[in-house]
Amino acid sequence: MFSRTMTSTSMTCENALEHLINQSWEQCVGSGDKIYVKQVPVLVTKMEEILAIDSTFTKIVRDSLSDFVAKNPMSKFNKSDARKVIMSSISPKEFASTLRNKYGLTDEVVWARINTSKTAQNDTFHIWKRHQDTAELRSKSMKDEEIENLKKEVAILRQANSEKEIQLRTSAREIDRLNTRVKSLTASHRDRGDGERSLAAQLADKDAALVESAQQCKKFKDACIEYKQREKETALAFKTLEKEIEKQNEVVSFLQSKLPVEKGSNAFKDFLKNLPIVKESFIFLKYRHELKNKRLLLTSVLSIICMFLLMVNLVSVIYYLLLPMVGSFGKGSGIVYMEEEEKTRSPGLLDLMSAIPSVEKFIYECIDW
């Protein structure tokens, strides 16, 4: 086509740039009027594909448009604007020089590749047309097949409807038979009306008894709820009373601890309180109402018993130690003085104690015990 419109003298690498721009626009954009500015390098890439070279010119155009794309990414160019931008980035002389020197392409080779691309584009249209016709035939075949399937489905549905109609007629006959049976049962039920009325009266009496029982049950439930509420109130009052008793016991204990000792000093009071039996008794009385641990109470009781046994044994030891000493200080145990074959005895301990009848009586009672 280009060989018919262009003379041999005009078919050079310098004027091939404009034809490449037009051809790449037709292949990439088609009948479109405008493209985005960031799509301009795509046209250059298509030109390089037609010439079968690498992306040298695409890089040049992309670098020259980078600032403009960054500022106006949504700007659009028409075909004339795109041609001006590409030819301002790549001059025809620079374009022809690069093709000849870098890629070794002659004018004839460049135009041959342009014409080959145009022919391939026309062949592509014919291939698309054949494909479109094949698709239409296939679509028509599929539609015919779909219509045939629909006809089969309609036939199946008609057969199913016929079967449903048969079932409906059978069901209608069954309903008539059941209606006849219901009428006969109604007549027999009417004959037994008196017996059923008496049974209904009995059921009514039982229902009344059930209602009365339900009322009694409700009354008992209300009474039970009231008793539970009273029980809670009683338990609360009992706890309050226990707390008050504990407070009173604390007050009594505090007042008892503050009572003064009538005789003796504080040391004598501490001595009495530290005696084992007194101390254990004091602890027992203190915890009589407040003690919650049974083990401690048992320990206190056992301690008192052990202390009592210890005191009994201690008194027994003292008794057995004093028994010989008391015997040695009996009557006739005084000091004997020898004067000219006459013995003079000083009064013994019992002789001195016999002067006081109450003391002598106490001593003899202890000895007898």
Image: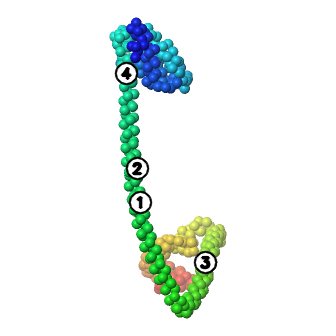
Mark 1 or mark 3, earlier in chain: 1
Provide the secondary structure element on which disc 4 rests: helix
| Residue 305 at x, y percent in the picture | 47, 76
Residue 165, picture quadrant: bottom left
Confirm whether residue 278 shows in the render.
no
Name the residue tied to disc 4.
119
Mark 2 in CB contact with mark 4 (< 8 angstroms): no
**Distance between the alpha carbons at the discs numbered 2 and 3:** 79 Å
**Distance between the alpha carbons at the discs numbered 1 and 4:** 56 Å
Q: Nearer the viewer, residue 54 or 210?
A: 54
The numbered mark at residue 225 is 3
**Distance between the alpha carbons at the discs numbered 1 and 2:** 15 Å
Q: Residues within 10 Å of mark 3 (few under 14, many from 20)?
A: few
Mark 1 or mark 4, earlier in chain: 4
Height in image: 218 above or below 249? Answer: below
- Amino acid at the residue labelled 1: Leu
Provide the secondary structure element on which disc 1 rests: helix
| Residue 257 at x, y percent in the picture | 62, 69
| Residue 17 at x, y percent in the picture | 44, 14
Mark 1 in CB contact with mark 3 (< 8 angstroms): no
In this picture, residue 161 sits left or right of residue 192: left
| Residue 107 at x, y percent in the picture | 37, 10
- Amino acid at the residue labelled 3: Ile
**Distance between the alpha carbons at the discs numbered 2 and 4:** 42 Å
Name the residue tied to disc 1.
157
Name the residue tied to disc 2.
147
The numbered mark at residue 363 is none
Mark 1 in CB contact with mark 2 (< 8 angstroms): no
Q: Nearer the viewer, residue 102 or 338?
A: 102
Q: Residue at x 51, y 82 (%)?
A: 363
